[in-house]
Image (spheres, grey):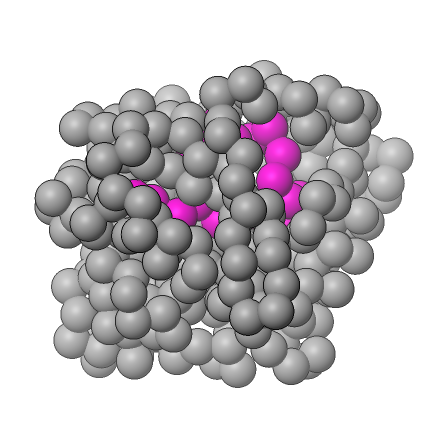
Amino acid sequence: MSSSSSRFFSSSIGKAYSLSRSSIPSFSRLSVRSMADSAFKKIQIQRDDTTFDAYVVGKDDAPGIVVIQEWWGVDFEIKNHAIKISKLEPGFKALIPDLYRGKVGLDTAEAQHLMDGLDWPGAIKDISASVNWLKANGSKKVGVTGMCMGGALAIASSVLVPEVDAVVGFYGTPSSELADPAKAKAPIQAHFGELDNFAGFSDVTAAKNLEEKLKASGVANEVHIYPGNGHAFLNRSPEGVSRRKSMGLSDEDEAAVELAWSRFNSWMKHYLA
């Protein structure tokens, strides 16, 4: 991805949050990295001339799902999501690639800095290598999902990673410089909050634009918009709720969360069975 495309992501998210470093609740680096770690097997995946860490949870022979981080990095919330995915019926093998190579943003300034420095073409290669690792290790079919930055990358993977069998993206769309959803090759389901104000990235206009692109692609697709919900509405851990409230994202709609997960599960079961 070009530097201008990277700036699109960071400016969209940064402007929408409009927060100082001090406005985010304090989570220690130790707690962020240790929470839920015991549930995962840490592996290393080789691609090109580099190796990256990944975290795996779930049944060995289950369909695989690559779970892509938000702009924070591989923190407590994305691990919570991966554990939940692994426990959905009939069971999935979830893998989180560490796109930031061990770094985690504890506030918006750090997260924006990490995302600004992300090698976007390299991130797509990480996703491709993760999909292929799952297929080489017991998963006959593999999907990709992600939230926020990860949602955009998940949708991009439908265009750029031929081995992907299904995609579910949450509140994120790729820039035209990264991938054109009109060229998607794998079925895509996407979820957005009606009150999301990340203009051009995950607001209702972005969702509608994605829907039109997916219609043009010819792949199976669904785009869902959740009334009364904002960005990152899936984040329901106590820490995630606290962080969202500090960002002015105070909506709490457990019914929408459960509906989104139900739709996710139905989509992945259908295409990965």
Q: Is residue 258 above or below residue 4?
A: above
| Residue 248 image offset from top left, x and y in percent | 66, 36
Number of numbered discs present? Answer: 0
Looking at the rendered image, the quarter that the C terminus falls into is: top left
Residue 265, quarter of the rendered image: top left
Q: Is residue 254 among what the camera can see?
A: yes
Bounds of the magenta segment = 64-82
Residue 255, quarter of the rendered image: top left
In the displayed structure image, the side of residue 42 where residue 265 appears, left or right: left
In the displayed structure image, the side of residue 20 where residue 187 appears, left or right: left
| Residue 8 image offset from top left, x and y in percent | 64, 71
Q: Magenta stretch: residue 203 in it?
A: no
**Front residue of 225 and 30:** 30
In the displayed structure image, the side of residue 223 where residue 129 appears, left or right: right
Q: Is residue 253 above or below residue 19?
A: above
Residue at (29% x, 61% y) in the render = 164
Q: Is residue 210 among what the camera can see?
A: no
Looking at the rendered image, the quarter that the N terminus falls into is: bottom right
Residue at (66% x, 22% y) in the render = 34
| Residue 23 image offset from top left, x and y in percent | 82, 34
**Front residue of 44 and 81:** 44
Q: Magenta stretch: residue 72 in it?
A: yes
Residue at (68% x, 50% y) in the render = 101
**Front residue of 26 and 36:** 36
Residue at (51% x, 77% y) in the render = 178
| Residue 272 image offset from top left, x and y in percent | 17, 48
**Front residue of 27 and 44:** 44
